[in-house]
């Protein structure tokens, strides 16, 4: 069984010939496993939520492991609780759009992204705390490559994340807090609705996989791919800053997920968790490593091999593992050599 248990997103030839380190990269025809420095135990498997007959033990186990004993989700939930209490300007009147609280939200989101993406980049790529241990693709992140803004992958990724990603995230947060305060979006009444709050928090990864799959399929089609999504796919190998490195229009579409709360009741904590989950887990799932180790023990699962396969092979694994959209629509690559042969056959048929 795999430990890869979260999500988490031109032509196949474009992906084959793309480079992330200036050297030619064409691993598509090699057996899947041999093309990687490290793979988790294969095949990677989607959640048991939709398995028939129902497998209650596997289902509860998946649900528990998705959160405990420690997970990116749990950490992001703690960030959201802190954001909604300690780091939110007390007494801020969010029914009025004023510069003071909007700036405070922007600075907090900037700080969160610097802590998560910056911290993971320092841990894995600057201080090399794990070397290449449990790293999927051992090629260095690109420098001296004109594909990237400023000619370097990390500078490019930081630029698009901080200059576009965080402001768009903030704009959605401000919009939803303002809408909630003015009654334009339905509110959970606390503490009475606390059970609904828990249910909606637990269901968020399921919604995330569905929303991500749908928008991701669309932006892989011409003409959206070339104009919009190709910017994210500059990264054939990934690091923490790659996750939210997207074209501004992709940021608008990717983070539009939170607009569901114009229909589904929410409160400020849920709005903050929803957006932080999408923005910050983009960084954690793109670390390029299976996770943080304590000795040989994986204590914090991070990078998803499912999405790493998408960055390498391009026309597979558009969604995540919570809902098996890729299995249902024939684009699932489970990392095994057999699955890879099928992937190549499908790709030949499509071109
Ligand atoms: Zn990605
Ligand atoms: Zn893609």
Image: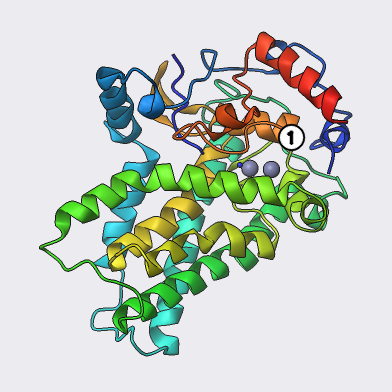
Relative height, residue 337 to residue 117 (above, below) = above
For image coordinates 62% across by 26% down, the residue present is 332
The residue singled out by tag 1 in the image is 314
Residue at position x 23%, y 55% in the image = 197
Question: In terms of secondary structure, where does tag 1 sit?
Answer: loop
Q: Quadrant of ligand 2?
A: top right
Q: Report whether 267 appears left or right of 125.
A: left
- At horizontal 30% and vertical 72% (from top left) the residue drawn is 186
Quadrant into which the N terminus falls: top left
Asked whether, in this view, residue 5 is left or right of residue 306, the answer is: left
Q: Is residue 174 above or below residue 154?
A: below
Q: Residue furthest front?
A: 53
Residue 140 appears anywhere in the view: no
Q: How is the image coloured?
A: rainbow
Relative horizontal placement of residue 228, taking residue 72 as reference (left or right): right
Disc 1 residue lies near ligand 2 with CB under 8 A: yes
| Residue 143 appears left or right of 61 | right
- Residue 111 placed where, x, y %? 46, 62
Q: Quadrant of residue 250?
A: bottom right
Q: From where the camera sits, is residue 46 visible? A: yes
Q: Quadrant of the C terminus?
A: top right
Image position, residue 322 (x, y; %): 44, 34
Q: Position of residue 320 (x, y in %)?
A: 52, 36
Q: Residue 27 lies in what quarter of the image?
A: top right
């Amino acid at each position: 069984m795999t430990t890869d248990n979260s999500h988490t997103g031109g032509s196949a030839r474009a992906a084959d010939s793309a480079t992330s380190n200036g050297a030619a990269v064409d691993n598509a025809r090699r057996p899947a496993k041999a093309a990687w420095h490290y793979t988790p135990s294969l095949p990677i498997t989607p959640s048991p939520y939709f398995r028939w007959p129902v497998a209650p033990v596997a289902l509860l186990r998946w649900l528990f492991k998705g959160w405990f004993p420690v997970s990116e989700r749990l950490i992001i939930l703690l960030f959201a609780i802190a954001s909604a209490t300690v780091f939110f300007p007390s007494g801020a009147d969010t029914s009025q759009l004023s510069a003071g609280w909007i700036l405070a939200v922007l600075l907090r989101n900037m700080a969160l992204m610097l802590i998560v993406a910056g911290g993971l980049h320092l841990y894995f790529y600057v201080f090399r705390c794990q070397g290449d241990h449990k790293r999927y693709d051992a090629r260095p992140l690109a420098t001296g490559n004109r594909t990237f803004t400023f000619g370097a992958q990390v500078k490019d990724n930081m630029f698009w994340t901080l200059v576009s990603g965080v402001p768009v995230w903030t704009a959605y947060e401000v919009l939803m807090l303002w809408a909630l305060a003015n009654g334009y979006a339905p509110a959970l009444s606390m503490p009475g609705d606390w059970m609904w709050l828990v249910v909606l928090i637990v269901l968020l990864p399921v919604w995330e996989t569905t929303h991500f799959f749908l928008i991701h399929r669309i932006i892989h089609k011409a003409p959206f791919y070339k104009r919009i999504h190709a910017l994210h796919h500059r990264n054939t190998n990934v690091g923490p800053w790659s996750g939210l490195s997207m074209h501004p229009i992709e940021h608008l579409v990717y983070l539009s997920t939170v607009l569901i709360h114009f229909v589904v009741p929410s409160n400020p904590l849920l709005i903050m968790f929803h957006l932080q989950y999408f923005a910050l887990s983009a960084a954690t799932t793109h670390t390029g490593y299976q996770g943080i180790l304590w000795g040989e023990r994986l204590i914090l699962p991070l990078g998803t091999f499912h999405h790493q396969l998408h960055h390498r092979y391009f026309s597979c694994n558009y969604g995540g593992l919570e809902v098996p959209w890729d299995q249902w629509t024939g684009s699932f690559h489970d990392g095994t050599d057999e699955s890879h042969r099928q992937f190549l056959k499908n790709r030949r048929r499509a071109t």
